[in-house]
Structure formats: C-alpha cells, structure tokens
Amino acid sequence: MFDVGRICVKIAGRDAGQTAVVVDTLKDGYVIIDGNVRRKKCNTKHLEPLKDILKIKKGASTIDVHKAMISSKMKVIENGKVKRSAPKKKVETKGKKK
C-alpha cells in the first residue's frame, strides 16, 4: 500500500494536513516521506494514502519529488511559499548600483 511514489496526507504531527510522497519504505511500518512536508521517517499510522502514485525512483531527492509533483499539476509548497510551475525569468540590469 505504501509503495515508493504513493501520495499521502499527513494526519498527525506538525505537518498534519500536508501532502507527502513516499520516497522509501523501511521496516516495521515506517517510510521516508518528502514533498510539502519535511523529509523524514514517518510511521504509516500517521499517513492517509491517496489513490495516486508519482513515478519517482526509490530515494529520490527533494528536487526530483517537487518536479514530479509539478508535472502532475500538484501544488508544491517550499519554505512556506507556493512554488510556481515555471521559474521566473531574471531581469538583467545594465550598469551597477551602489
């Protein structure tokens, strides 16, 4: 049920109500989660699995998880801000400011 890539909702703890993705499975009912929560070991009793599964590799980095979430049109929250689907373009300024 809690395979790599499974999308879940955290139902207990500090990140309760946030969307998470299973990155790795461990022994005794524990998994490693990442996504809109802090990357950490979590008890499966504290997760509510959803029907969707993202295509990520076992042990994928946070950046890879966020890219997979964006490609599946999920909202990504990073540092308390919603991350856009495409990064903003940087505007180059001519001359130096002092």
Image (cartoon, rainbow, N blue to C red):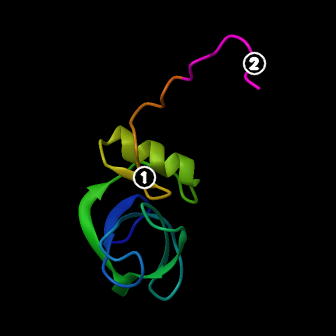
29 and 72: which one is in front?
72
Quarter holding residue 15 = bottom left
**Residue found at x 49% / y 89%:** 28
**Residue found at x 62% / y 16%:** 92
**Rendered position, 57 above or below 91:** below
Mark 2 lies on a secondary structure that is: loop
Quarter holding residue 36 = bottom left
**Rendered position, 13 above or below 60:** below
Q: How many marks?
A: 2
The first of marks 2 and 1 along the sequence is 1
Pinpoint residue 46: horizontal percent, then vertical percent: 36, 84
**Residue found at x 68% / y 10%:** 94
Circle 2 sits on which residue?
96
Mark 1 lies on a secondary structure that is: strand
**Quadrant in the picture for the N terminus:** bottom left
83 and 44: which one is in front?
83
Circle 1 sits on which residue?
81
Pinpoint residue 20: horizontal percent, then vertical percent: 39, 64
**Quadrant in the picture for the C terminus:** top right
Q: Amino acid at mark 2?
A: Lys
Q: Amino acid at mark 1?
A: Lys
Pinpoint residue 72: horizontal percent, then vertical percent: 32, 42
Residue 95 colored in magenta in the image: yes
